[in-house]
Amino acid sequence: MARQAQTWQQAGVLGLGIAAALVAFERWTAGDLARVAIPCLAVAAAVWPYGVLVIDSSVQGAYYSLAIVGSLVVSQAPSHRGTAALGLVAYVAAVGVLGLATMARPDVGDLIAEVIVPTGSTAVLTGLMFPNKRFYDVVAELEDERERDAELAVVRERMRFAGDLHDIQGHTLHVVKLKIALARKLLHSDTARLEQELREIYALVGDTIEQTRELAYGRRKLNIAAELENAKNLLEAAGIHVDVDCRAGASHADELLAQVLRETTTNILRHSRATLVRIALSEDGLTVVNDGVDDEGLPELRGLADLARRVADDGGELTVERADGRFLTAAAVPAPPTPGDRAATAGQAGR
């Protein structure tokens, strides 16, 4: 469009229209069009009559910036979008008619170039933006709903943790209360029984402290089957499709694999925008793959780093890979050799 100008001043004005269109489009894609809507629309609205009245009719693209900015702004209007669209199209047509009136001997070609093409193009582009606006609104609503579901899933996980803590300490405190009441009754009648009750209270409190510590650091004994069901429920509650392939019975590493699955589930909910999670469980390993990963912005996953050391201490290996928007967590914990296997190995080494 600017190449059709005859002077540097004309090129500068038409270039302002291009700049206004680019700024408006960039802010529209960022969801921040309202901040620049009025200045961009004012610039674009001034470029169109300038191109028609000041330059000449050969600058047919002078309406491009107004058509682009106007369609974006009108579709984002909070109300009266239909009226605003009609006003935009009428303005384009009116300027074209004004330019046509200033010509000495206009013909049909001038009518098409100055009025019909600019008006029709603006109307079509603006009309197309209305269904696009509704589409993006639906996408935004779905994204907000997904974020709320993910937050709800995290809240449920915290509530489950609070429930575990209540189960540990609530039961212990209730038992301790009963035993102390019994100890008070035995204080002057049965000192041997009193001593036994105090020993049991001491052991119970110590055991509760250890269980609480294990719960706080994620080391409480877990059941892989229960954790698999819990992970599936949490992820599906966040709107994520879960595909489970379970080919394992009882495993020597159930607790460790369950801990890996719990940490991985937490990471998916907190650090990804996953739509699909595949979980494969075998007797000696667990593999979890999820999509929706930002290859650049994923934070350091310290929980998995700590688990990697625990898996290694158990003779296994924890693999973490990220590529093409997918994140893989694989824990391989081979079964320890049986006494027969060790004897066979020793015999081969002796030969």
Image: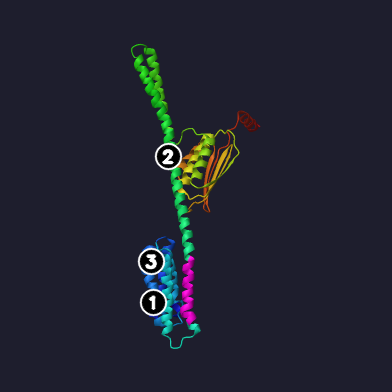
Q: Hey, which residue is sitting farthest bottom in the picture? A: 104
What residue appears at the point 40 percent right and 82 percent down from the top-left corner? 53
**Residue 156, x across and y down, in percent:** 44, 40
Q: Which label belongs to residue 158?
A: 2
Q: Secondary structure at mark 1?
A: helix
Q: Earlier in the sequence, mark 2 or mark 3?
A: 3
Helix, strand or loop under label 3: helix
Magenta-span inclusion, residue 108:
no
- Count neighbours of disc 3 (C-alpha within 10 A) and say few if under 14, some if 14 to 19, many if 20 or more: many
In the displayed structure, would residue 122 be above or below residue 219? below
Which amino acid type is marked by label 1? Val
332 relative to 155 in the view: left or right: right
Q: Quadrant of residue 335?
A: top right
Distance between mark 1 and mark 2 Cα atoms: 59 Å
Tell which circle, 1 or 2, labels the residue nearer the N-terminal end. Answer: 1
The residue at which mark 1 appears reads as: 13
Q: Which residue is mark 3?
A: 37
The x and y percentages for residue 166 are 41, 32
For the C terminus, give its image quadrant: top right
Most prominent secondary structure in the magenta stretch? helix
Where residue 220 sits: x, y (%)? 46, 33
Front-most of 313 and 323?
Answer: 323
Residue range of the region highlighted in magenta in the rendering: 111-128
Q: In this rendering, is residue 72 above or below 327?
A: below
Q: Residue at x 37, y 23 (%)?
A: 177
Does the image show residue 5? no
